[in-house]
Amino acid sequence: MNPRPGQETSNMKSSRLATTFITLIAISGMAMLGGSILKLNALHQYQFLSLLVISAVASRMRVKLPGVDGTMSVNLPFMLIAAVQLSLFEALVVALVSAGVQCIPKSGGSMRPVKALFSVSTMVLAAGAAALLLHSDWLVNATHRISSVPLVVACSMFFLINTLPVATIISLTEGSHLLRIWSSICHLSFPYYVACTGVTSIITAMSQLIGWQVPLAILPVMLLMYRCYRLYFGHATKAPAAVNARAAAAH
């Protein structure tokens, strides 16, 4: 069945808008990375390399979000810790490598370059915005009595920048309602972001007392969280399928 002329025009318009939006996000991500290079002073060396490696490892522990064309991995706390403890450039490199590793398909799958570019650029923008807020003098001075507020604000910005563009591109490509899609993504991922914000706050405080090596010890905790999310989303995916199978058998 061929689409109606009006429907075909609408699809072409949505495709052009999606391409324009992806291009805008990619350019913004490259601009953020380029600006961080100009501000680069010195690397934290071992701390930077350790967070880079462990974040990449955590990126492979991912779960498929039900009802959404996307995955969620347990690399978020390490990117947030990088934003707190490292320079802007280092935080962006951690986010870029982590997101890139997350986009690598499992055996038998094929890489989708446009989707990977969009995912990496979005993650770079989210990590950059969070790092800029965390190192902003005006935010720190405005909330000097409550030290956790800058982290909460930064994590909230990370959440918005990492979820709104995803909801937008899904809305443009599938023709669904933007707020409905974003609400669905928030419902699935918001508890995870809250938990990761708490973990980042605790680890940051412990690092000041013990040393920068503390973040390396939370990988087992994130592994446990990954197992819990995988079981939860596995049941959430199987439940509708079971209902449909029973309905088909009844007919």
Image: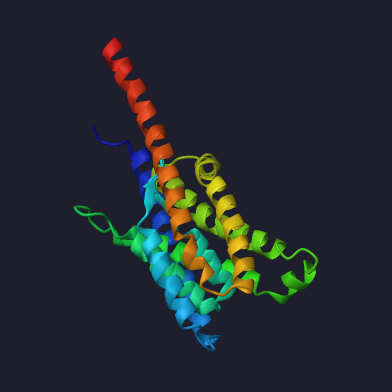
Most extreme residue toward the front, as rendered? 210
Most extreme residue toward the top, as rendered? 251
Q: How is the image coloured?
A: rainbow
Q: Nearer the viewer, residue 32 or 214?
A: 214
Does the rendering let one see residue 245? yes
Query: In the drawing, does residue 85 fall left or right of residue 94?
Result: right
- Which residue is drawn at the image coordinates 48% and 49% (left, top)? 167
Q: Nearer the viewer, residue 228 or 56?
A: 228
Query: In the drawing, does residue 173 fall left or right of residue 129?
Result: left
Q: Quadrant of the N terminus?
A: top left
Q: Nearer the viewer, residue 180 or 146?
A: 146
Note whether 58 is above or below 240 in the view shown.
below
Q: Position of residue 158 (x, y in %)?
A: 56, 60
- Which residue is drawn at the image coordinates 63% and 73% (left, top)? 208
Most extreme residue toward the bottom, as rendered? 41
Does the rendering let one see residue 125? no
Q: Position of residue 97 (x, y in %)?
A: 39, 69
- Which residue is drawn at the image coordinates 68% and 74% (left, top)? 136
Q: Nearer the viewer, residue 191 or 92?
A: 191
Q: Quadrant of the C terminus?
A: top left
